Amino acid sequence: MTDLTDGASAAIETVMLIDDDTFFHAACERLMRRTGLVNNLIKFAMAEEALAFLERPDRPVIDVLFLDINMPRMNGFEFLEEALARFGKDFCRMIIVMLTSSVNPQDIERAKAFCAIDEFANKPLVQAQIEAIAAKLKAAGRPVV
């Protein structure tokens, strides 16, 4: 887990990123640090590792999940199916943003079929997207500073 703040409170406590592109990990970390809206970032390159982390009783509450569609071994849709099977509706308490660099309309339609997915976003992420998610958490009555 990467602490992104200098001891100050941010609007989003914990973000989880699941994406096999480590360059994208670094870009997201820079973006979230620059916005000052995220306290902690947890990054995984493989979906299976993220599932194992989510099973830990000592893990922090995840406020936002950024999930890539196309990953080796287990793609984003397969991850969601497995997470929903393991954790049930409790898994849906976080905001889930499906990420892609694809322009395939079938990906968008498939993402819309998952009730757990709150948003579908093309890479790269931009500051306005992080700001909108922080506002959505605040509007939902989530603890946002």
Image (spheres, grey):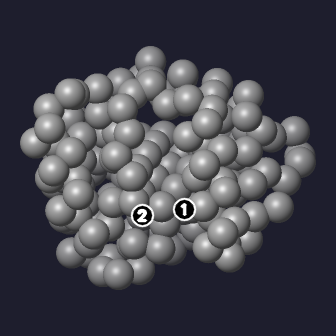
Which residue occupies 29% across, 33% down? 100
Extreme bottom residue here? 89
Pick the front one: 83 or 139: 139
| Quadrant of the image occupied by residue 105 | top left
Asked whether, in this view, residue 3 is left or right of residue 84, the answer is: right
* Label 2 CA crowd tier, 10 Å (few <14, some 14–19, many 20+): some
Which percent across, then down, holds residue 43?
Answer: 48, 40
* Label 1 CA crowd tier, 10 Å (few <14, some 14–19, many 20+): many
Question: Does 133 appear above or below 21?
Answer: below
Q: In which quarter of the image is the N terminus?
A: top right
Residue bearing mark 2: 54
| Numbered circle sitting on residue 62 | 1
Which residue occupies 39% across, 72% down? 91
Q: Are marks 2 and 1 in contact (CB under 8 Å)?
A: yes
Q: In which quarter of the image is the C terminus?
A: bottom right
Q: Which mark is nearer the camera, 2 or 1?
A: 1
Task: Note whether residue 46 is visible.
Answer: no
The first of marks 2 and 1 along the sequence is 2
Which percent across, then down, holds residue 117?
Answer: 33, 60
Q: Helix, strand, or loop for circle 1? A: loop
Asked whether, in this view, residue 13 is left or right of residue 125, the answer is: right
| Numbered circle sitting on residue 29 | none
Distance CA(mark 2)–CA(mark 1): 9 Å
Amino acid type, residue under disc 2 in the picture: Leu
Which residue occupies 56% across, 29% down? 126
Asked whether, in this view, residue 26 is left or right of residue 6, the answer is: left
Amino acid type, residue under disc 1 in the picture: Ile
| Tally of numbered discs | 2
Which percent across, then down, holds residue 44?
Answer: 41, 41
Which residue occupies 29% across, 47% down? 47
Task: Note whether residue 64 is visible.
Answer: yes
Pick the front one: 13 or 47: 13
